[in-house]
Structures are given as structure tokens and as C-alpha cells.
Image: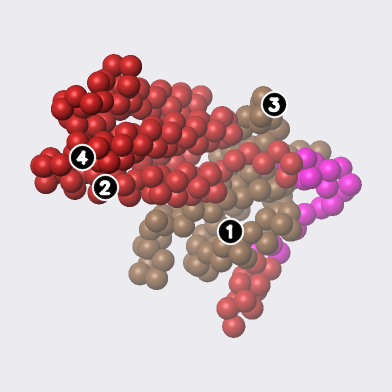
Chain colours: A brown, B red
Amino acid sequence: MKYAIVFEERVLDNLVEWAPPESVLDELERRVEEQLAANPVQYLTRLTSPQGPSVVMQYNCPILQRSPETPGLHHFLLRVIYDEDEKTLRVWDMRYYPPA
Amino acid sequence: MAAIAMAEEIFAGVQERAGHALEFINPNRIETTSPVSRLNIRDGVRASLQLRDYLIDACKLAFKEVFDNRVTDYNLAGTLCIASFDVALKTFRAVARSLDAAEAEGLLNALDHHFEEEVAKFRKTIPELEAAREDIRQRWPWFDESRLLQSLAAKQRGEPGKPAGDAFREVRNRIRGAGS
């Protein structure tokens, strides 16, 4: 069974602000579909909140680009929670680290 | 857990090196009017520069832990990194005060050329560390609890979020629109 992945609007605002290269966005979308949606248990790590163990999980997504336009490692951290239906993962926070 | 241990290790390493640097300018141990005191200032500067190198390299390792997915408590690890900068900056400022006092007393005349280069590097390090601290504070992937609470509330209100396919399509269109 594939999980549905949904993004909150402010996460999309962040992505637009960062404006990663289109090829990186394509690869991120592919990974989200092929890794996170297909097998979240394998790819998610549970985080600790200031109050202790939390409902938040994190998906680390390093994307190595070899194209001359955007060479290097683009790194995304996606923070997700499960929806009540247990079939949907909601991305509520994201970080992006372009190549140094 | 490994990353918390690493952040703790970095903090302990900074404290140890800071203590070493401060011993050279400890007025309870050092006679500041003695001709030998200039050598203590020199070694305090050198120990501070070692502390700077340690901290800069340690922060790179801390980010590597993030990217290797070895951090679970981001706020604790990040707070320890920032605290490490604060300890280092306090140390640098204390050594800088001693250096200024020694220079004003004329104690540092005729020290070797290599030490002059080290002092020049030392002088640049405080603003450099202040900038690095701010950079870490901004770039560190803090666990934003208020943002999480807003998301949980939105989820409870039944706000659906945007499916991945639509979301990426929207992002591409908005980026292209902003670039045209």
C-alpha cells in the first residue's frame, strides 16, 4: 500500500522561497513518491521534541546532482506526522541545504 | 542518541580548551608585570586559536551528523552547539582584554614575526565566531514546536493539505513565475 503524502501550504511557500533547481525538485518528487510514500517505516526517523518522544518523524533526503548547472549535494529534511487515517503523511516542516 | 553524545562531546571539548587558554591569563596564577607574562599572553593567544579551529571543525561534524540522520533531539544538540560558541567567545574576549593590556604596557614589543601574524588572526576571530554562531543559529534544523502545534490544529480542523503531485506542480509554476 502506498501512503498519500500531503504538504502544508507554508511548506510550499518555503520551497518557492528557496527555489531549488528544477532538476532537484524533480528528483525530490520522485524520492517522495518512491521512498516516503512507498515505505515510510524504512525511511522515517522519530524525533524528540522539547517534551520528549514525539509524534514527529523525519525523512532525510540527500540528492546528489552531477549536472554542471547544479553540482553537489542538495539536502532536504522533511518533517511529517501521520494523519488519523494512518494512510496519509502530512509534511508540516521542511529544511533545505544547498551545496556549500 | 549518538548526536546528542557528539554535541555533549563538542561542548566538553570547548570547555576543556577554553580552560586551557584562560589558565595562561589567570591573574591569580600569573604575575602580569613579570617579563615572562608576555609568553603567557602569547600562549593564551595560541590556545585560543586552537579552540577556534576545534570549534569550526566540530560544527562541520555536527552538521554531518544531521545529514547522516543521526540526530533525534535537534533542540538539545543545537543548544549545545550554540553554548559552545558562547563559551569560546567569552574566552576570546577575556584573552583579548589581557592582550590589549599587555600591548598597552609595552610588554609585547619585539616578539617574533610569527606571533604578530597570530595576533592579527586572533583579532579577526571574534567577529568571525560571532558570524558563525549566528549562521549556525539560523541554519540549524530546530524542532519548531509552535509550528507543529499549528499543524496539529489544522489537522484537527480537517484541513487536508495539498497532495504531493499538485504541490510540486504548484511550486514549479510559482518559481517559474517569480523568475520570469
Picture quadrant where residue A69 is located:
bottom left
* Direction top: furthest residue: B29
Regarding mark 4 in the picture, which secondary structure is present there? loop
**Amino acid carrying mark 3 in the image:** Gln
Subunit that carries the residue with mark 2: B
At x 63%, y 39%, the residue is: B143
Q: Which residues are magenta?
A: B148-168
- Of circles 3 and 1, the one toward us is 3
> In the rendered image, which residue does mark 3 sit on?
A51
Closer to the camera, B140 or A54? B140
Find out whether the residues at labels 4 and 3 contact each other: C-beta distance under 8 Å.
no
Q: Residues within 10 Å of mark 1 (few under 14, many from 20)?
A: some
Could you give the CA–CA distance between mark 3 and mark 1, rounded to whole angstroms?
A: 32 Å
Whether residue B164 can be seen here: no
- What numbered label is drawn on residue A29? 1
Task: Tell me if residue B40 comes above or below residue A38 in the rendering.
Answer: above
Quote the CA–CA distance across marks 4 and 3: 55 Å
- Front one among A100 and B101: B101
Where in the figure is residue A78, as x and y percent of width and height? 60, 47
> At which x and y percent is residue B142?
59, 41
Q: For mark 2, what is the residue? A: B121
Q: In the image, is residue B178 part of the stretch drawn in magenta? A: no
Q: Which residue reaches farthest bottom?
A: B180
Q: Is residue B165 magenta?
A: yes
The residue furthest right is: B157
Q: What x and y, as percent, mark residue B61?
A: 38, 37
Q: Looking at the image, is mark 4 or mark 1 nearer the viewer?
A: 4
Foreground residue, B10 or B153?
A: B10
Tell me which label, 2 or 4, sits earlier in the chain. Answer: 4
How far apart are the two marked residues, 2 and 4, measured between alpha carbons?
Answer: 20 Å
What residue type is disc 4 on?
Gly
The answer to whether B55 appears left or right of A41 in the picture is: left
